[in-house]
Image (tube, rainbow, N blue to C red):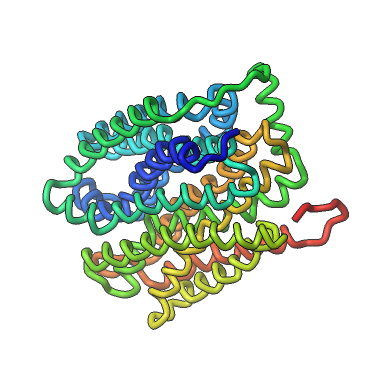
């Protein structure tokens, strides 16, 4: 394993660029949702289900993805999957109705299923273990740049050329990203024997049977998955219906949330890296960040409007702090299983994100509409339930147990 900065950069940057495109397409529906609702007559449950189709396919492929990454390496897996996303974008652009939209959105999610995990696998191959929290945070900050592009810039582009042409443009950019990864990213060579698929799947199942996995998965899945569901869909309608903002004002607020995410997640990595050098492990750092995470959500649930926008910024900045646990968990189960270890945690995160994107829409749909929007009380109920689930997961994680839990 080389640790030269130039080599590490060349090993990680192409994958980080692919992750940027992943987050762009994950979040784009928060901006184009009004156009989809107008053109196809979607209700809140249908909108939530359509947006969550990305996450459904994404999380369904996480477990086989871990096996593929460990067997074939991130370069080949990521470059092929990105071409699937490009095809999904092209189909989405010409979709005549909800069924094709849903299928295309799922295809996009399937193709981007390796966005972060391929990056983390590359990190495990090229970055020393004690610096991976920082490297992973830097990679995620590139994804946050995609989230920035998915807000006001995408709103302006959509207003100029229409949402269908926007998706055709995205398809071309994704093809370019695939070619860049395939030609620029190095291939890690290993003389170690490659296990059979049967053995690799057996090891994956064993990871999910670990008491440690059952203890941390609900906490990491919910505390990371719920902010994903909010920022990539429901934050936009919340601004419109609770704060009464116009479409471009909504896009601008989403833009600043994305900026907060980009710099916040990088700061989280820097802080964790510094604390790690002082002997404070990533899970202890995560517990402190979750206090801010919970407080911000409480303000949003209670709809304290004077503090609402700062609360959304805080939630955006620390909402993906669960990434601190990825290298920690991989070390617990074994470095040779890092792809599968990361995939199991990522699977938990996106199961939660899918359930919340769809579930919030179902709950909101049970309340009476208010003109062009939804009732503000619907957000209080649905987001209050989500906050309660996260608190239960935190109690489950902290509940005293007989087995030792590494910190």
Q: Is the residue 45 above or below the residue 383 in the image?
A: above
The reply to whether residue 57 is in sight is: no
Residue 188: x and y, percent?
54, 26
- Which residue is drawn at the image coordinates 27% and 65% (left, top)? 252
The reply to whether residue 100 is in sight is: yes
- Which residue is drawn at the image coordinates 58% and 33% (left, top)? 63
Residue 244: x and y, percent?
28, 74
Q: Quadrant of residue 338?
A: top right
Callout count: 0
| Viewer-side residue, 42 vs 26 | 26
Residue 58: x and y, percent?
47, 38
- Which residue is drawn at the image coordinates 45% and 43% (left, top)? 55
- The C terminus - image quarter: bottom right
Q: Quadrant of residue 92?
A: top left
Task: Pick out the residue farthest to the right.
Answer: 402
- The N terminus - image quarter: top right
| Viewer-side residue, 181 vs 59 | 181
Q: Is the residue 154 above or below the residue 300 in the image?
A: above
Q: Along the horizontal axis of the image, is 137 left or right of 103?
A: right
| Viewer-side residue, 386 vs 331 | 331
Q: Is the residue 21 above or below the residue 30 in the image?
A: above
Residue 307: x and y, percent?
42, 80
Task: Pick out the residue farthest to the left.
Answer: 160
- Which residue is drawn at the image coordinates 25% and 51% (left, top)? 32
């Amino acid at each position: 394993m080389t640790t030269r900065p130039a080599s590490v950069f060349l090993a990680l940057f192409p994958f980080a660029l692919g992750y940027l495109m992943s987050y762009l397409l994950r979040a784009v529906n928060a901006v184009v949702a009004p156009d989809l609702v107008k053109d196809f007559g979607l209700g809140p449950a249908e909108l939530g289900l359509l947006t969550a189709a990305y996450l459904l396919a994404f999380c369904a492929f996480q477990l086989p993805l871990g096996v593929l990454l460990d067997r074939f390496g991130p370069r080949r897996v990521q470059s092929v999957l990105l071409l699937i996303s490009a095809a999904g974008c092209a189909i989405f652009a010409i979709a005549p109705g909800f069924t094709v939209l849903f299928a295309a959105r799922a295809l996009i999610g399937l193709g981007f299923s390796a966005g972060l995990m391929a990056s983390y696998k590359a990190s495990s191959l090229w970055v020393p273990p004690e610096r991976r929290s920082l490297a992973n945070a830097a990679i995620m900050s590139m994804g946050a740049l995609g989230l920035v592009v998915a807000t006001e810039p995408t709103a302006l582009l959509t207003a100029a050329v229409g949402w269908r042409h926007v998706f055709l443009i995205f398809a071309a950019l994704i093809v370019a990203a695939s070619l860049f990864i395939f030609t620029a990213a190095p291939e890690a060579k290993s003389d170690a024997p490659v296990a059979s698929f049967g053995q690799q799947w057996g090891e994956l199942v064993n990871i999910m049977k670990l008491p440690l996995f059952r203890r941390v998965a609900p906490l990491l899945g919910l505390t990371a998955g719920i902010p994903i569901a909010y920022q990539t869909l429901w934050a936009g309608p919340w601004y419109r219906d609770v704060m009464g903002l116009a479409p471009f004002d909504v896009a601008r607020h989403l833009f600043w949330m994305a900026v907060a995410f980009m710099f916040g997640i990088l700061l989280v990595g820097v802080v964790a890296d510094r604390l790690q050098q002082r002997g404070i492990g990533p899970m202890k750092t995560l517990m402190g960040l979750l206090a801010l995470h919970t407080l911000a959500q409480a303000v949003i649930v209670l709809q304290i409007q004077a503090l609402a926008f700062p609360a959304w910024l805080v939630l955006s900045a620390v909402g993906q702090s669960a990434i601190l646990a990825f290298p920690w968990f991989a070390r617990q189960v074994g470095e040779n299983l890092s792809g599968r270890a990361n995939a199991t945690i990522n699977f938990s995160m996106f199961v939660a994100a899918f359930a919340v994107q769809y579930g919030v829409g179902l709950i909101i749909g049970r309340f009476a509409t208010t003109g062009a929007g939804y009732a503000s009380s619907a957000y209080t109920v649905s987001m209050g339930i989500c906050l309660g689930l996260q608190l239960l997961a935190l109690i489950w994680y902290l509940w005293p147990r007989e087995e030792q839990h590494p910190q």
